[in-house]
Image (tube, rainbow, N blue to C red):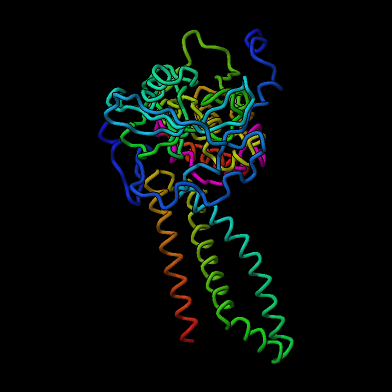
Amino acid sequence: MGHATHEVSILIIRSSSQMPRKSLLQRFPVPKNLGVSPGSRIVQGRTWPAPATATRVRTFDIYRYDPATGDNPRIDSFEVDLDDCGPMVLDVLIWIKNKVDSTLTFRRSCREGVCGSCAMNIDGTNWLACTRFVAETRQRATIYPLNNMRILKDLVPDLTHVFAQYALIEPWLKTKTPAPSRERRQSPAQRSEVDGYWECILCFCCTSGCPSHWWNADRFLGPAVLLQAWRWLVDSRDEARGERLDELEDPFRLYRCHTILNCTRTCPKGLNPGKAIGGIKKMLLERRS
Amino acid sequence: MTAAANRPAAAERSAGPLSPHLQIYRPQLTSVLSFAHRLSGVALGLYSVLLVAWLIAAAAGSAPFSSMQTVMRSPAGQLLLLAGIFCFFLHLCGGIRHLFWDAGYGFDLTAIYASGWVVVVASVTLTAIAWFAGSVM
């Protein structure tokens, strides 16, 4: 894993963990405040200098928002002593919180990529702060919260809406037949159908990196939720496939997916939401014919 | 429901700023080609109006047609034509790539990137061939 994440590629990206060797553009050539409401506009914040004893300094530009003041969000620049700090981006955030500004707010829990709490936008793409090496970030790295979310504080987005979308697909086993005396059994082949989908940790890196979800977050379910929908559609024990497909067959809920595939490019677990959504579309087509 | 009651009211929570998306997200082959596909589709819609204008000019007689030809032979007209041909081939190649996805193929990340670059190279090459063929005919 450690070796693989350091791989860089010029043209062909083979794994979502790979960083591009060169990016022609670091962001789209649009005005910084294109379509941004006045209250969401980002202003320049302050610089927090490195300690005088620092030996290897790197600057991180971090999105800040304090609901107590209600001021516009700002970008604070933190000079971090990498020799005093762990190797991951999450270590940088914890270092800042412990040693520089204790008000810096972010979610974190497992620090090993299984809980999905520390999903954020690092250098322009979404990833987990705990599994992104500082060595892979730019010389002047940027850290924003997940995109297109209402921000509660600093790097903490309000996930109420995306979890409501998750609840909409009713992510639990639904059966009509009487419960057997023991568990509902699956063959290894049937079980393998959910491989690559059950591993989703609901970090919402993909959903918040999806342009279609940026434009239609209110009605388009987004890649994370649709991947979960697929996970239940292909579960051999589930007996509600028809009803599930009925709920998904909608111009907005499902078909706002235009196969952009930013989701598959960004998934920090290396899953393939794009393929899952393609599977749902194909299943709906097969049902109709 | 008690958990929900402990959280701040929905109105209060939604008062926070919206985090930036298009403004800061890194352009990648995935999103750039998708945007290009849709924009070239819109452009082709406009080009079809130009094509109809061209045909009307041809039907209206030699004088309107020759003035239309003068416009299209000017440097700006030639640039417009070149861009139109490129839009056509980009949209065609991108459309074929979408057909593969619709059939369930090409979703692995390696295939996504390989087919993406094939679309870029093929549309540039086909534009060059079409331009060359048009200039010698």
| A288 to the left or right of A61 | right
| Front residue of A91 and B89 | A91
| Front residue of A278 and A266 | A266
State the extent of the magenta-drawn residues as a range.
A246-270
Residue found at x 54% / y 74%: B79
Q: Quadrant of residue A270?
A: top left
Residue found at x 37% / y 25%: A92
| A68 to the left or right of A123 | right
Q: Residue furthest front?
A: A52
Residue found at x 29% / y 24%: A53
Residue found at x 49% / y 87%: B137
User: Would you place residue A119 above or below residue A214 in this image?
Assistant: above
| Front residue of A77 and B15 | A77
The x and y percentages for residue A104 are 48, 21
User: Would you place residue B36 above or below residue A105 in this image?
Assistant: below
Q: Quadrant of residue B116?
A: bottom left
Whether residue A88 is in magenta: the answer is no
The x and y percentages for residue B112 are 42, 48
The x and y percentages for residue B36 are 53, 56
Assign the magenta stretch its main secondary structure. Answer: loop
Disc count in the image?
Answer: 0
